[in-house]
Image (cartoon, helix red, strand yellow):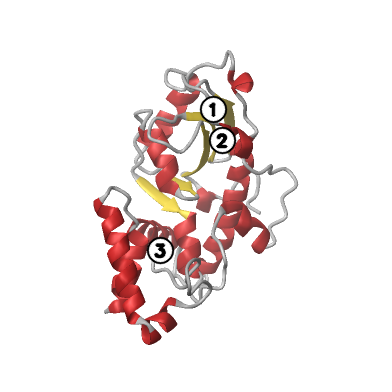
Amino acid sequence: MLKDNMDDKFKNLLFLDVETTGLEEEDRLVQVAYVYNGMEKKSFFHPGREMSVRSMEVTHITNKHLEGKEKFQGSNFYKELADILAQKDTIFVAHNAPFDISMLTREDLVVDQFIDTIKIAQDLDVKGDIPAYRLQYLRYYLGIDLDDACAHDALGDVKVLMAIFERMYEKLYGQSASHDEVIKKMIYISSQPTLIKRFNFGKYNGEMIADVARKDRGYLDWLLGQKEADAASGVPDEDWIFTLKKYIR
């Protein structure tokens, strides 16, 4: 695990996680936690709306927990986080970063450079051996032992995020010439569509997509049509569209 005071090579990396009222456009964050240059912060906020039952089930945060909490915007926490994000050297790190970024964007915070550890995990899993890339799944799949990291608590998730990031960093560092090269590579991978290796649904569940492309290209053509239709309806899935086009070619 990363040292508590953090090595200088992790300077300016903002490890962050949020918990929210739900997953819809109108939902808002209720808890934010981050670690930045050895500084650890966590707080609850009143979202101005009620928690969904689904979110309470997952996070165990209830409306009662949020009674009397200050709003995120205007808080000292908000101002400090905004200052960190405004620094040109800050690199935002999260698992499924687009989601956390979208929640911060709703609060008028801007994220410039970012690393998405779910994208890095998928890229490093060359053979598609890992069944799932969820944060807590990776925690146990990789055998990461953390006694003080409760699941679905923002700070607990940040600690898992940092441990997973370290594993990925070490693997990429062994393939690279310098720290800067590793970070640049992570940023690049995070900005690109992911090439999915294995089906995790449907009649070919568990099979390598490359194998299915050789024996049933028609299925890939059909699935691509479904994914493109979904995208036209406002439900994009760029990773699958990118993957299917790649294998069909």
Q: Three-letter amino acid code at disc 1?
A: Met
**In this view, the mark in front (2 or 3):** 2
Closer to the camera: disc 1 or disc 3? 1
- Disc 1 to disc 2: CB gap under 8 Å: yes
| Label 2: which secondary element | helix
Query: How far from the left and from the top, in percent, is residue 182?
Result: 44, 62
Which amino acid type is marked by label 3?
Glu
Q: Is residue 141 above or below residue 47?
A: below
Disc sitting over residue 132 in the figure: none
Residue lying farthest top? 68
Note whether 174 is above or below 226 in the view shown.
Answer: below
6 to the left or right of 249 = right
**Residue situated in front as seen by the camera: 86 or 107:** 107
Instruction: Name the foreground residue: 192 vs 84.
Output: 192
C-alpha span from label 1 to label 2: 6 Å
Q: Residue 223's x, y, as percent?
A: 34, 68
Residue 218 is situated, as x and y percent measured from the top left of the image, at 32, 79
- What's the CA distance linking mark 2 and mark 3? 38 Å
Q: In this rendering, does residue 193 appear at all?
A: no
Placement of the C terminus among the 4 image quadrants: bottom left
Q: Would residue 6 be visible to someone looking at this image? A: yes
Instruction: Answer with left or right where residue 134 lies relative to residue 182.
Output: right
Label annotation for residue 181: 3
For label 1, the residue is 51
- Which residue shows up at 40% across the image and 34% down it? 104
Secondary structure beneath dot 1 equals: loop
Residue 221, image x and y in percent? 29, 73
The kind of residue on which mark 2 rests is Ser
Q: Which residue in the structure is indicated by mark 2?
A: 55
| Residue displayed at 58% across by 61% down | 167
